Image: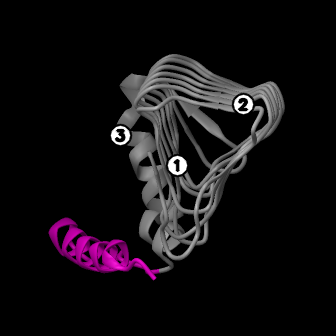
């Protein structure tokens, strides 16, 4: 299914494959030789999504461009089943494995592997050929890779970066968690309701 959002419609190369159950919304570009498989969702909420030549977005992956962060996927890159990519630049010949997540403002140079269930957090930079092992968390620029048992330290590092500041240009560091969520959901829902 293809849908217009904010006046923009998906652009698909005639040499690309998009499965009939994939959903493409807004300013999404799929280059020649690329494939978007069943159940994948590519949505340009308020920033573009670009899938490079001969890249593959597998089943049930979610790829989003949001706010000031477009998602750009390079050449011959694989986005695995159930993976989640929002507002990131991903280089050539990368792999974002099954159920891995890459968040806003992340930049992955060529040849990066984000293994099964791994997380690349907001504003993180991974250099060429870096590898984030299964279930590990990469945070920062330069990236620090935390094992699962050090998730609290990774969480503190993300707080220092400032998730809402990086993603929404709004500093909520002085707010309690529930106040942050109240602001975030009200602001984001208002933006998502817009279709101009």
Would you say residue 193 sits in the magenta stretch? yes
Residue depicted at 72% across the width and 29% down the height: 55
Classed neighbour count for the residue bearing mark 3: other residues with Cα under 10 Å, few (<14), some (14–19), many (≥20): few
Assess disc 2: are there few (<14), some (14-19) or many (≥20) residues with their C-alpha within 10 Å of its C-alpha.
many
* x, y percent for residue 21: 41, 32
In the figure, is residue 121 to the left or right of 75? left
Outermost residue toward the front in this view? 14
**Of 41 and 119, the residue lying toward us:** 41
**Residue 165 visible in rendering:** yes
The residue at 71%/32% (across/down) is 16
Residue 73 appears in view: no
Q: Callout 1: helix, strand or loop?
A: loop
Cα separation, mark 1 vs mark 3, equals 18 Å
Which label was assigned to residue 152? Answer: 3
Residue 125 coordinates in the image, percent (x, y)? 71, 46
**Which of 4 and 168 lies nearest the eye of the viewer?**
4
Check contact, mark 2 vs mark 3: CB within 8 A: no
The part of the image, by quadrant, that contains residue 123 is bottom right
Give the magenta range.
Answer: 170-196
Can you identify the residue that label 1 sits on? 103
Residue at the disc numbered 2: 34
Find out whether the residues at labels 1 and 2 contact each other: C-beta distance under 8 Å: no
Q: Under tag 3, what secondary structure?
A: helix
């Amino acid at each position: 299914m293809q849908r217009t959002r904010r006046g923009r419609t998906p652009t698909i190369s005639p040499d690309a494959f998009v499965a009939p159950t994939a959903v493409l919304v807004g300013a999404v570009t799929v280059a020649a030789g690329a494939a978007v498989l069943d159940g994948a969702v590519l949505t340009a909420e308020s920033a573009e999504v670009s899938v490079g030549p001969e890249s593959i977005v597998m089943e049930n992956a979610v790829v989003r461009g949001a706010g000031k962060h477009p998602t750009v996927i390079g050449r011959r890159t694989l986005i695995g089943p159930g993976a989640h990519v929002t507002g990131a630049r991903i280089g050539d010949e990368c792999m974002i494995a099954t159920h891995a997540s890459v968040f806003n403002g992340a930049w992955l140079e060529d040849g990066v592997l984000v293994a099964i269930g791994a997380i690349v957090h907001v504003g993180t930079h991974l250099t060429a050929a870096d590898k984030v092992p299964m279930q590990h968390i990469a945070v920062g620029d330069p990236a620090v890779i935390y094992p699962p048992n050090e998730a609290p330290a990774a969480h503190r590092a993300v707080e220092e970066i400032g998730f809402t500041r990086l993603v929404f240009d709004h500093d909520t560091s002085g707010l309690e968690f529930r106040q942050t969520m109240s602001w975030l959901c009200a602001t984001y829902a208002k933006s998502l309701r817009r279709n101009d």
